[in-house]
Image: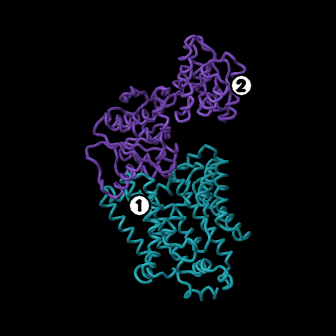
Chain colours: A purple, B cyan
Amino acid sequence: MKLAKFMTSVAVAAGLFAGPAAAEDMRIALVVKALGIGFFEAAAEGANEAAEELGGVEIIYTGPTDTTAEGQIEVINSLIAQNVDAIAVSSNDTDALVPTLKKAMQRGITVVSWDSGVAEDGRQAHLNPSSNALIGNMIIKLAADHLPDGGEVAVLSATTTSTNQNIWIDEMNKVMGDYPGIEVVSTVYGDDLADKSYREATGLMQSHPELDAIIAPTSVGIVAAAQAVADAGKIGQVNVTGLGLPSEMAGAIESGASKSFAIWNPIDLGYSATMLAHQLATEAATAEPGAEISIGRMGTITLDETNSAAMADPFVYDSSNIDAFKDIF
Amino acid sequence: MSLAENTTRSIPDRLRSPLRSKVVSWETLLLGVAIGIFVFNSLASPYFLDAWNLSDATFNFTEKAMIAFAMALLIIAGEIDLSVAAIIALASTAMGVAMEMGAGTPVLVLVGLGTGLLCGAFNGALVTKLGLPSIVVTIGTMSLFRGISFIILGDGAFRGYPSDFSWFGQGYVFWVISVELVIFVILAIFFGILLHKTNFGRAVYAIGNNPTGALFSGIRVDRVKMILFLMTGLMAGLAAVCLTSRLGSTRPSIATGMELEVVTMVVLGGVNILGGSGSIPGVVIAAFVMGLVTFGLGLLNVPGIVMSIFIGLLLIGVIALPRLWAMWRKS
């Protein structure tokens, strides 16, 4: 597969496939932080899925070799030169891409950012994988789903000053009323260090013998907590959940230390970014605050005052789908 | 000085090789490659032959080439500076600090150039005063300069440079002729004359061929080397001004990995990595070759990694060719 891909690239380089595809095709460029990253390869898969669904759309999946802003600018310059219809970029630098992307927009190219955004002047709209409110709700829901009769849960966070985690925990606390019987007994901080997170998780189980679940909204903490639960022989009693990466969590799902966890789905993200770019490029939708834009199977997004939108709830991974995703990211 | 003048006739600009003396020079070979790539690109992509697109393509190499000119002289003299990309990061960060303190465009440019010059002086002093090998010194300062930048900025960024500052990296002098392209041409002429037409240039070759011999010929070897490090630092500072202006912002990761692209450009231009030979016209053509290859392949949406393979093969090919030619002639 890799070899075939490489050979195709070489063939393209040799000019065998020279010239653009059918002129009437709309060309949407999916520019990623760097090529060869599983997460972005999966996003490209989603983009191609969107292109097939839409019809008459050609996806140009491209990006620099390293995650540099300069490399992305070279790529974007060549896309401007080809006069593509739309550019959807996950940027390496919020600010450095702005002058180049402005130039793209001046030449009539639709520009959206996704995943990792660009400053407002440099794009028409930005698609976040999720929103703080959705994440806050998801992490408590993951724990509550396996506790129909209520129970004690504890939070293992990153550092006390981690902006993202603090916002998510705040959002979680706001919706606790929706989950009667669930009680957050403690919040501890593992500082996003594997060993400290492990010790904190072990400490939680000792000080709260009735503990039913540990919520770790950090990819370091969730892995460490799962390990701590397994080592304490409490698999089945304490469920570890939160936000993590499928590649790192596959073992914990298999052992049962974690029944499920969540993170964005890169396939959905690439699909939605393409849909959004297509909607704006065909002028089926306008990028303005409050605009409701349909993004195919993912439903509808609403742009906020900065023309940003949240795609969906974080995607839930469990024993039914972990094998398909553990090799991706 | 009279000794240096006498050497004018005795040390050739280029090492004699069978290929070069008999058939073509390195520069002609490279020029052929450049023209080949140009023709190939025009045929392969309908977007290539467009004045604005070609103008955009020059940004792929102008900043690197500015440094490559000074680096060529440094490498010919038998030294190297691997800290140039880190100097860009530090100079850009210094400009950001100055901007936060309310400096206008002229001051920003001076801060950028001045930081480059200071970094060059630091490298040069370590090499000439302490007699340390430049490759080790500049691998060290590469981490040092960028490290300072990371300490100042962390994961933050400087943005909000004055609008007239954007002239250097985004401005045009005339039609599609960008400011950076004009700077590139002026520097090419300046360094071409400096290396090929002055006593200083002769001294650079002499040092690269035989530093001890050069010393005994009355050339102030350390002084020449110091000047070369200062020039390389200054050019990195100038590249920092252009790049910062083009990006409109500063992050400590700016220009990551650029030092290797600069060295590649210099070596592709026919400069002997061991010192002693090379020419500025060669580096100019190499700059165009690298710019045209990356832009042309970019237009065909060839993944960056395949581009790197291309550049690598090109480099090995162009360097191996004269050697293979010589072996073939012998047998």
| Front residue (pair A17, B324) | B324
| Front residue (pair B328, A138) | B328
Q: Judge from the rendering whether residue A265 lies leftward or rightward of residue B208; answer left or right.
A: left
Element at badge 1? Answer: helix
| Front residue (pair B105, B325) | B325
| Residue A98 visible | no
Please give the chain letter of the residue carrying mark 1.
Answer: B
The residue wearing badge 2 is A203
Q: Residue at x 55, y 48 (%)?
A: B249
Q: Judge from the rendering whether residue B149 lies leftward or rightward of residue A274; answer left or right.
A: right
Spatial CA span between label 1 and label 2: 59 Å
Residue B64: percent from the left, percent from the top?
51, 61
The residue wearing badge 1 is B293
Q: How many marks?
A: 2
Classify residue B30 by image quadrant. bottom left
Instruction: Name which residue type carries label 2.
Output: Gly
Residue B33: percent from the left, percent from the top?
39, 69
Instruction: Name which residue type carries label 1.
Output: Val
Please check whether the numbered discs 1 and 2 fall on a single chain: no
| Front residue (pair B104, A200) | A200
Local crowd size for mark 2, using a 10 Å CA cut-off: few (<14), some (14–19), many (≥20): few
In this view, the mark in front (1 or 2): 2
Look at the picture and state if B285 lies above or below B142. below
Q: Residue at x 55, y 12 (%)?
A: A148
Element at badge 2? Answer: helix
